[in-house]
Amino acid sequence: MKIAILGGDGFCGWPAALHLSDQGHDVIIVDNFSRRVIDEELEAESLTPIRSLSERRAAWKEISGKEIGFAFLDVAQDYESLVEFFRSEAPDAVVHFAEQRAAPYSMKSPRNKRYTVDNNVNATHNVLAATVESGQDIHLVHLGTMGVYGYGTAGMKIPEGYLDVEVTAREDAEGNAVEPHRIEQQILYPTNPGSIYHLTKVLDQHLFAYYVKNDSLRITDLHQGIIWGTHTEQTQRDERLINRFDYDGDYGTVLNRFLMQAAVGYPLTVHGTGGQTRAFIHLQDMVRCIQIALENPPATGDRVKIFNQMTETHRVRDLAELIGRITGAEVAMVPNPRKESAENELHVVNDTFLDLGLNPTTLSEGLLLEVEQIAEKYKDRADLSKVPATSLWTAEQQAGVPSSI
Ligand code: USQ
């Protein structure tokens, strides 16, 4: 397949590009380096020393003999170039990672909120409109988030995108009273995003549903949990292929932050009671899921295909305790900078990927390796002043009132 990876220089995009290229696909990265620009803005660098994209691509060619193409393009801003790119390259599939992906960054200020909405919603809509305008039969695979559901269970496992609902109707469509009768339907699972970032992925879902209905596009939306890990089989082949590892308060995700904090002797920053339960997936499984999704596209006319891309759920304080046990790190309960439930249960259906052959890397087998290979190896590059999470969700929190819902 010819596959365009939008956002192919980022944390998920780069390892996905390498994996698909390794599988023999013709891969082209599209990126505007916005993630590297945000590094400069936040003065927070990846713990791992990532190379420029041209050095990464040259190293991959040297090692694998395979070429990864590149187009510099701002998907959110440069619509005409995107249409031209789809026309001239005629990709079979587009994998869309080109969105601002950090919840804390999206909540930092009105500017950050507006940037995240403008960038993410425009990027997604441009991809959809450009697919239609270019006339190409493209399978779009989008990286969504488990966070569209909120993190409650409502007494059942969270299904893959759609909820079966049964309504007892006592009127007919004209409003006339009739014998009560049951109507069954499937609807998009009700959304409950916890940040402006997560909200943009909710808005994406509606754009997808509309374009599938109106233009018969073929779309897969992957509702992904929190990634942990840094390496994939390909990124380990050469130091120049190394993936980014964020540990700062905005972009660092919880488990990778804890691993880094353990390596540098920084007490593990558990927010609030640490009672939040979240879904997780290792980076290696993420790239495999992208491959599986690409190999199993929906047919023309099918509704948006939604997969829950996660393999395990864990409570944050349990993760901290686990890492504490493995490494001897201390655990610190810090005031929660977010507005989120203090405690939640989370149970998720993830049958589609398991049925299609995903063999998950579990936390228990991978954790120690990750601490040693990445966090320990690069700990001297860490800037400890960037560890605390400083982005506060509400005006009350900014005024010093702790918050949870
Ligand atoms: N947390 C801590 N201590 C920390 C960092 C986080 O207790 O030092 C807590 C947070 O309060 C939250 C949970 O850990 O309850 C997860 O936070 P996170 O930063 O690891 O994850 P999140 O903000 O939800 O976002 C990440 C990715 C995002 C992806 C999402 C998947 O940045 O791109 O969509 O995970 S999910 O969480 O399933 O929605």
Image: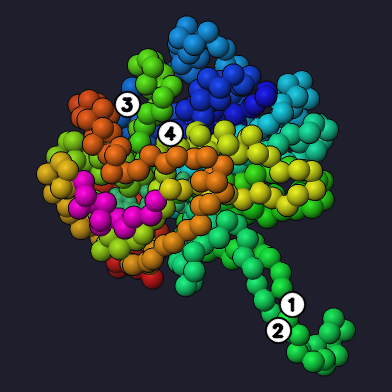
| Residue 38 seen in this snapshot | no
Residue 94 percent coordinates (x, y): 66, 32
Q: How far apart in space, not on screen, are marks 1 and 4 (Cα)?
A: 42 Å
The kind of residue on which mark 2 rests is Thr
Q: Is residue 314 above or below residue 21?
A: below
> Where does label 3 land, which residue?
48
Q: Secondary structure at mark 3?
A: loop
Q: Which residue is mark 1?
A: 183
Residue 231 versus residue 148 in the image, above or below = above
Q: CA distance from mark 3 to mark 2?
A: 57 Å
Per the rendered image, the range of residues in magenta is 312-323
Considering depth in this image, is 312 or 278 the residue closer to the camera?
Answer: 312
Asked if marks 1 and 2 touch (Cβ < 8 Å), the reply is: yes
Residue picked out by circle 2: 168
User: Along the polypeptide, which appears first: circle 1 or circle 4?
Assistant: 1
Q: Quadrant location of the C terminus?
A: bottom left
Discs 3/1, front:
1
User: Is residue 332 left or right of 110 when viewed as pictured?
Assistant: left
Label located before the other in sequence (3 or 2): 3
Percent across and percent down for residue 13 are: 51, 31
Residue 262 coordinates in the image, percent (x, y): 19, 40
| Residue at position x 80%, y 48% in the image | 301
In the rendered view, would you say 176 is above or below 231?
A: below
